[in-house]
Amino acid sequence: MYIESVPNRNSRPAILLRESFREGKRVRKRTIANLTDWPTVKIEALRAVLHGQTQLGEPLETAFEIVRSRPHGHVAAVLSTARQIKLEALLDGQPGRMRDLATALIVARIINPRSKLALARGLGKETLFSSLGEILGLESADENDLYAAMDWLLARQAQIETALAKRHLTEGALVLYDLSSTWYEGRTCPLAKIGHSRDGRKGTLQILFGLICNAEGCPVAVEVFEGNVGDPTTLATQIKKVRSRFGLERIVFVGDRGMITEARIRKELQPAQIDWISALRSPAIQGLIEGGTLQLSLFDTRDLAEIRDPAYPGERLIACRNPLLADERARKRRELLAATERELGRIGAATRRSRNRLQGKDEIGLRVGAVINRYKVGKHFLLQITEDSFSFERDEQRIAAETLLDGIYVVRTSLPAETLDAEQTVLAYKSLASVERAFRCIKTVDMKVRPIFHRLADRVRAHLLVCMLAYYVEWHLRRALAPLLFDDDDKEGAAAKRRSVVQKAQRSDDALRKIATKRTTDGELPVHSLRTLLEDLATVAKNRVRPKATGLPEFDKITQPTPLQQRAFDLLGVRLHM
């Protein structure tokens, strides 16, 4: 920093406190304070301090004191990204306190997910978790303000999702839809029901939420359902949302075999004249083999074949076989069968021991049922249970029949080949992996949506909406920061290494190099996960500095970024002085 005298034509010179900074290859300067009204003595005292001198002769480092220090770099990165993608305008076209509070909820969900009380304290002046509260002018906000912002945001959900759809969905576009669950703490929310836990938390109340994304995995809409609702029954509400609210007539729903079932196709998709891409379940594939439509010899020289079957009129069936997937399924089956045999063997031994023998059909059956439910391969065993004995053997015929299906899957679609050929259709179905990636980010290391503590149904819906919007910002953040992350930023190189769409997706050579060396492709900087990179950026602090000389004003000074941090800010187009 330095003091500069700027001449004025018709008045005395302006005395300005300025700071120089580098923007690319150019050196620029910014004005920090106007000192024109200061006495000359005070100006000279400050000039001396800036030149490393003090009036009292003490060392320069003792002439200032840092009043407070706030983590700032991660806030600058995330908030700048949110503003570049016009998140605030998406929430509300007019500036206002509620919009700022909602923005704080979304940004904080990426930076450091926490309770509303903890976030309110972090926004205030006393705790100083980050500079977010100061930048958004929310230092006086409390947890009640944040809850009010959640209610305000939920009331605008339809408007926000419609705006997102206009940005990321077009007529004839692929619409990816999938469902996940999270567990609930407590028993007061009417949405929380006993249901299937995808997180392995058996016996806990569940809440379901469905996510709509575009073909690239960018989230567009989220909807919350009761925890005991079946996946296929949620499809009708999404069709209505896309048709009536988003105003799209020609769309292609992409869902897994558990979502877009035969019943949903017949009752909902076909009457609405909506195209779809899904896959067949194993019994249906077995039926194709037994009926002669799908012959395993098709895969002797290729791994993909398009077939037709009278049982699926107006549909195209694309049969695929992945040898690596076949080997993996065979390995899993061997391990599960062996584990089941060990446990069943112990039950059999318990019925034959000399003391405290296990007896009674009911008691033996309960023990056997627990093993079968645990390993899920009971269909491959023939069981014999009597009042005082138990024996079992493998059903080799059934195992052999299932082995034939290893590595085989059949994608089904209503789209004509002129619209989407066989390979493009398979890739479209596999793009559901991007929705699964979104669920992982929302549920685990990034947004940490689980467990849910909100008692009111609308607060749970608002909580999921905040998490979805946070992932929307993160999705753009990841794309911009990809060169510094383990993420593959060379999609074309990765696609070129994939000899067939049936094969597992490949990483590009640049991505493999980053993984092996743990450094960027040019070797200059370390690579990170998004979480550790944000933690690194958080060390860029915004310091409040107070000169000890009487009458000199306090000022803010941001710590100098490291080369890694500066590279991240450059990729994001962030200027630290926001």
Image (tube, helix red, strand yellow):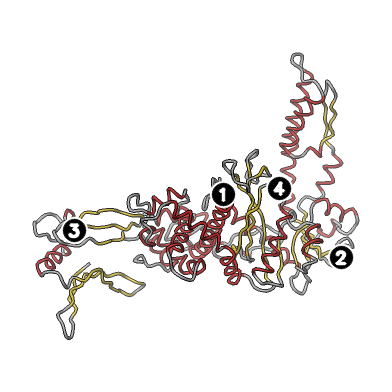
Query: Where is mark 4, residue-wise?
Result: 328
Query: Where is mark 1, residue-wise?
Result: 456
Local secondary structure at mark 3 = strand
**Quarter-wise, where is residue 310 in the image?**
bottom right
Q: Residue at x 75, y 45 (%)?
A: 330
Residue 139 horizontal/vertical position (percent): 36, 56
Query: Where is mark 2, residue-wise?
Result: 313
Q: Mark 1: which amino acid? A: Leu
Q: Mark 3: which amino acid? A: Pro
Q: Earlier in the sequence, mark 4 or mark 1?
A: 4
Query: Where is mark 3, residue-wise?
Result: 547
Q: Mark 4: which amino acid? A: Glu
| Up/down of 100 relative to 208, above or below | below
Q: Earlier in the sequence, mark 1 or mark 3?
A: 1
Foreground tag (1 vs 2): 1
Q: CA distance from mark 1 to mark 3?
A: 50 Å
Foreground tag (1 vs 3): 1
Local secondary structure at mark 1 = loop
